[in-house]
Image (cartoon, helix red, strand yellow):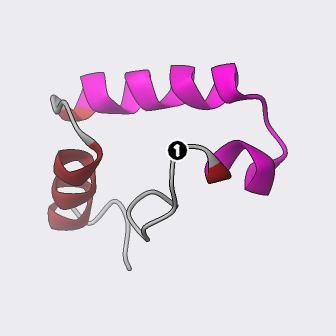
Amino acid sequence: MLARGHSYASVPGALELKVGTIQTHLENIYRKLEVCSKAEAASVAIRKGLIGI
């Protein structure tokens, strides 16, 4: 959802999850991809074929 331009604030409501849950997942994703920002994460995920937009 973030790679498609959704804001951090809109993700929990759309997925019916709590903000803390989303934050934990994002921290894990950033750590595994070795990135520090939403833009970096999207770029690496697209390049590695993990997501398509």
Residue closest to the far bottom: 53
Crowdedness of circle 1 by 10 Å Cα count: few (<14), some, many (20+)? Answer: some
Horizontal side, residue 40 vs residue 10: left or right: left
> What residue is shown with label 1?
8
Residue closest to the far right: 16
Q: Quadrant of residue 33?
A: top left
Residue at the image position 37 percent from the left and 75 percent from the top: 52
- Does 14 sit above or below residue 8? below
- Does 1 sit above or below residue 15? below
Which residue is nearer to you in this view: 44 or 22? 22
Residue at the image position 16 percent from the left and 33 percent from the top: 35
- Does 44 sit above or below residue 36? below
27 within the magenta span:
yes
Circle 1 — which element?
Answer: loop
Q: Please, what is the three-letter code of the amino acid marked with disc 1?
A: Tyr
Start and end of the magenta stretch? 11-32
